[in-house]
Amino acid sequence: MKLSFKASPNYRSSQSTSSIMRDLTLCLLAVTVFAAVWYFNAYGSAYGLRVIGLTCAAVVTALVVDALWFKAMKQDVKASILSNYSWVTALILVLISPVKTSYYAMIVCTAIAIIFGKMVFGGFGQNIFNPAAFGEALLMTNFASTQSADFVTSATPTVTANSYGWLMTAEDLGSLPTIGALFTGNYPSTIGSTCAILLILCFVFLVMRKDIDWQTSVVYVATIFVEGTLIGLTRGASASLGLIQVLTGGVLFGAVFMLTDPVTSPVTLPGRVVFAAGAASLTLLFRLRSNLADGVLFSILLMNALTPAIDKMFDGNQIRDAKKFAKKVWCTLVVLLALMFAIGFTCSHKEPAAASAGSSSSASSSSASEVLGDADYSSANPTATDNGDGTYSVSAKGFGGELTATIGVENGAITSYTDLSGSDNGDGIGDDFFTDGYLDKYQGVTLDSEVDSISGATFTSKAVNGMAQAALRAASGEDMSGAAASSSASAATLGSEDLSSAKATATANGDGTYAVTAKGFNGELTATIGVENGAITSFTDLAGGDNGDGIGDNYFADGGLDEFVGATLDSSIDGTSGATYTSTAVKAMAQAALKAAAE
């Protein structure tokens, strides 16, 4: 006879693992359906189908890996698959990934997450790390360059907030989606992390079904809110910063679906409180003091590693030692709060790349004023067609696609700027342009007038200003139909341009190539550049934190650096609109390699 012993008190739960996983699967599918529908409506059918395709690829991969593993282990394949619940890992992995993730990366990372994040530890219930978080960490650090360039969205709120150092003033919050948009999920981010209302409903459902304990999620969210608010207030940031910290990124998704994993979190209530508070503090630490735009993922993985130590910290009789454990919990919370408060004092508000005065990109990439007739908007490809009634149908390339409008011109000045439309509306970044009355400021503007850009909305600013420039030039007799307005400003050559802000270095490898580095938007960028006879022959292996930020990703795509092949110090190289830091860094590396080769 086999006896099972467990210290009292004991109770029998009506919940089973299968019912818990069924409820969890339903909630994850609800989030997936919402994401597919939102991307379909916001960006088109290709984006909605992309969400569905990535989900199918991940789930099928998880099931196939399960089948092969259990077949090799000579176990009942069907029964083992149904009791391993790897499809839950696959669904979570998809929902914490961006929509532009390649199928190849999703399939490989799902397989590795199942094998090395779960199976090698003994399968379901034995893993020490959350397998979905393990897979996403692999995807972020090793497969970012495989992301599809065909699926582009506006910058996520976490990327935008990170550009300000997460210490945003009330004025800076205009660069983020509204609170209403954050609650309803009307903005792009990782696939399943946007709709706060839906995630809260999933949390309530799972708690009511007794599938998860509410304490872990509530402590995690509350700690982020309190610490974020206090740090923001002491550093002159907006009072609503704590709420912004909670509603952006993967905080709510992680709180509902990842931190509550009973396998990788402490078994005792005091342990779960410390676990959640520690994860919250690490999330804020990563956001404030690292190159990570979010930080939720790695905070969960680090706390997973600390789970055995936390369990040991609260090992003992939970009733008899309740007061002692409560004291430990409060001491831990006070220490974490004090540490984060101290770290907060070392942080400061930053100016985003689009408003950096030290950037060497075109004037329209900053928030400073520029003369409309002298500015270079060629990258937006603005066009103007005369309607024959004193108005012009104008178009230009915005961040999410083509923008169109109607501009009236009389005696060399704009009399009206109306009917602005395009997919940039609702992206949470350049929405100001689409609000009632905003374009009235263009009335009376001439080619000699100074105009402003919206900080953080470089693409949209370029497009709107470029259309105004195109209409005025067309009215003055220039042919602006189907051709971009040419800039009167001469472009600087690669050798003469001031790129010192990127602090580029070049070290000869001895084979005609140079190992180059430069300061990008999210940290150091590295690459290898080949030089022969004073010209660049290759520009490869570009890597760094800017990849995947949604702004300068085109440089990391296949062929993104081809424009540098053949370039010399006398060549003129254009920057990428909206990616001032990355453009400066990439050009600075090319300049450094050419200058090193010339020495």
Image (cartoon, helix red, strand yellow):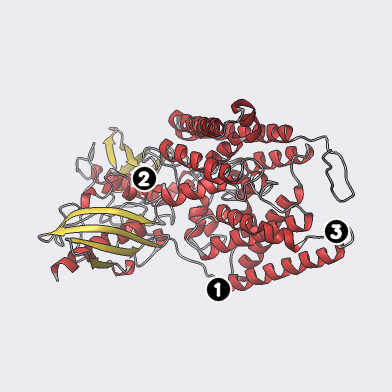
- Residue 448 coordinates in the image, percent (x, y): 28, 57
Inter-mark Cα distance, 2 to 1 = 49 Å
User: Which residue is most to the left?
Assistant: 533
**Mark 2 — residue?**
415
Q: CA distance from mark 3 to mark 2?
A: 78 Å
Q: Which mark is residue 317?
A: 3
**Is residue 20 positioned above or below 226 on the image?**
above
Question: In the figure, residue 46 lies in which quadrant?
Answer: top left
Residue in the image at 28% along x and 66% along y: 499
Q: Are marks 2 and 1 in contact (CB under 8 Å)?
A: no
Q: CA distance from mark 1 to mark 3?
A: 41 Å
Which is nearer the eye, 332 or 465? 332
For label 1, the residue is 346
Q: Check disc 2 and give the amino acid type.
A: Thr
Q: Secondary structure at mark 2?
A: strand
Callout 2 crowding tier (Cα within 10 Å): few <14, some 14–19, many ≥20: some
